[in-house]
Image: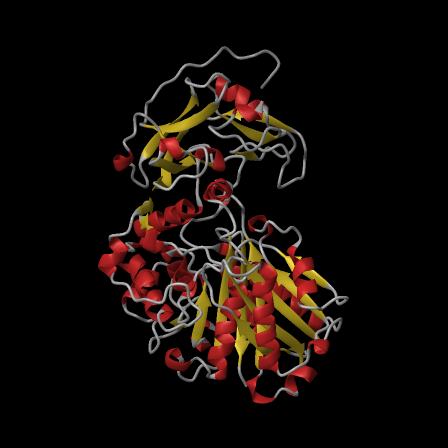
Amino acid sequence: MPRVGVIGIGHGRFGRRSDATVQELAFEVFRTALEDAAIERDAIDASVIAAVPEYHKQRSVAGVVQEYLNLNPRPTWLTEVACASGSAAIRTAWMAIRSGLHKVVAVIGCQKMTEMETAEILALMGRVGEVQWESVFGTTFPAYYAMFANRHMHEFGTTRDQLLAVAVKNHHYGAMNPNALFRKEITLEKAYASDPVASPFCVYDCCANADGAACLILADEEVARAHGDRVVWLDGVGAASASMSVLRRPDLVGLPSAREAARQAYEMAGVGPGDVKVADVHDCFTIAEIMAYEDLGFCAKGEGGAYIEERRSYIGGDVAVNVDGGLKAKGHPIGATGVSMAYEIVTQLRGEAGERQVPDADVGLTHNVGGIGQYTFVHLFRKE
Amino acid sequence: MFGWFGKVSFVPYTKVSDFAVHLKDGRLMGSVCADCGRFAFPPRADCPDCLSGSFEYREISGRGTVHTFSTIAAAPTGFEDMAPYTVVVVDLEEGGRLLAWAGETLDPADVKIGMPVQVVPRIFEETPEIRVYYSVEEPGATWGKAPVRGGEG
């Protein structure tokens, strides 16, 4: 089967971007990705836009982005699966290329989250769960993951120190990433001292909303091969869903959609967890990264706490995880996050990650979760 | 009637609207598929197994055990006046789960995973309109029930 390659990448600064509209953010990363790919705009056949609509005043954001990039009349469409929208866009582009419909597709994840008033954010926050039976009790995003954390601590003895060690690691690497929202190291003591959010979580267990964009240019094998040895191949795409409601999950110590998506991606790429050298996983909350180690097979279920405590997810450990700072330190512009993850893995596999380069990185993985695992996309990238 | 359910309602209409009427009468109702007998809590009108659209309500005891919980400090719109409050996921004795607040008999500090609890139908008494919910209480907690209405199971 012909392969799909990444030939260009672009990434903007994540954070409060009061200086730019969403299409202006998209423009920055699209231009960078074209320059990186050393292709002209005319080479692009189509674009897939990832964004979560309810944060934008502008409705149907794909249209305004496509026009601003001067890509009309090429086709464009939006993918939306909450925080996994970016990876859904990459999967859609992969499908479009593998089908033979398009040769070169631009994937642009772009999100402005700071346009909204606090009251609007608080109202949205109250509708993240299943609204018929759960949101009526005032559930919030942090509270759902906090309930996973409490159950994980109960079943496996996972500790608060282990949870917050994830935040300490991700801030450590975020300090080295020029695109990150938070570029400073934190200590365990500082993390503990932050305000409570939803027990057992405090502020430092949670990632932060941000504005931001990232772009990937994908191409079919023939076009990609012409780009020489900087090409990174997207060799495994896995995707799965799970119940909207926590009331209908088989367990609350992991994400069944992540386990299934990982199984598919490993099988398609012909690799296993032991082959992965570098991974970007969906650490929207500290427990989410610990569950990701387990769901992706980096360690057995229940051993995720020890995995971070023993620094096995640091560079020099088993699998370097979120060495771009993760959602925690980099910030989480929800439509852009999946594309940002792929940006980091491609950078690592090219050997262009500078002071946070993972040695001998030849296989990399992204794990992008929508909601509380209603949707998970796992992608495997390979350099050769 | 489903608009009665919850401190804030997002779902005024559903095929299981009478759930809220039963809750007002002091009854917690799951559903049973009229064709294959599959039980569900929360109730649902359409069977995920056999695809039947026929169902009947079945009252549950409300007894269960705590599956997990969290005390929410940062509350969304409509719940700010209650914070901090504790949400509890309960594994029900008859099957299924529910999510509800730790109620007046249950100190949030005492909530532990695996402990037995009693889910109790509740009415918000301070609101002019009817608003109903359920809360998670100590085992053995009691409450009043209205007489069974005619014609409704």
Instruction: Tell me if I can see residue A6 in this picture.
Output: no
Instruction: Tell me if I can see residue A186 in this picture.
Output: yes
x and y, in percent, of residue A279 in the image = 45, 71
Q: Residue at x 35, y 58 (%)?
A: A302
Q: Give the residue at the far front of this rendering.
A: A19
Residue nearer the viewer, B122 or A240: B122
Image quarter where the C terminus of chain A lies is bottom right
Image quarter where the N terminus of chain A lies is bottom right
Q: Residue at x 31, y 50 (%)?
A: A202
Dividing the picture into quadrants, the one containing residue A295 is: bottom left
x and y, in percent, of residue A164 in the image = 30, 58
x and y, in percent, of residue A142 in the image = 40, 48
Instruction: Identify the coloring.
Output: secondary structure
Q: Is residue B22 left or right of residue B107?
A: right
Q: Give the residue at the far left of this rendering.
A: A189
Residue nearer the viewer, B7 or A248: B7
Can you say whether B3 is above or below A220 in the image?
above
Q: Is residue B57 left or right of residue A68?
A: left
Residue nearer the viewer, B72 or B16: B72
x and y, in percent, of residue A90 in the image = 61, 67
Dividing the picture into quadrants, the one containing residue B144 is: top left
Tally of numbered tags: 0
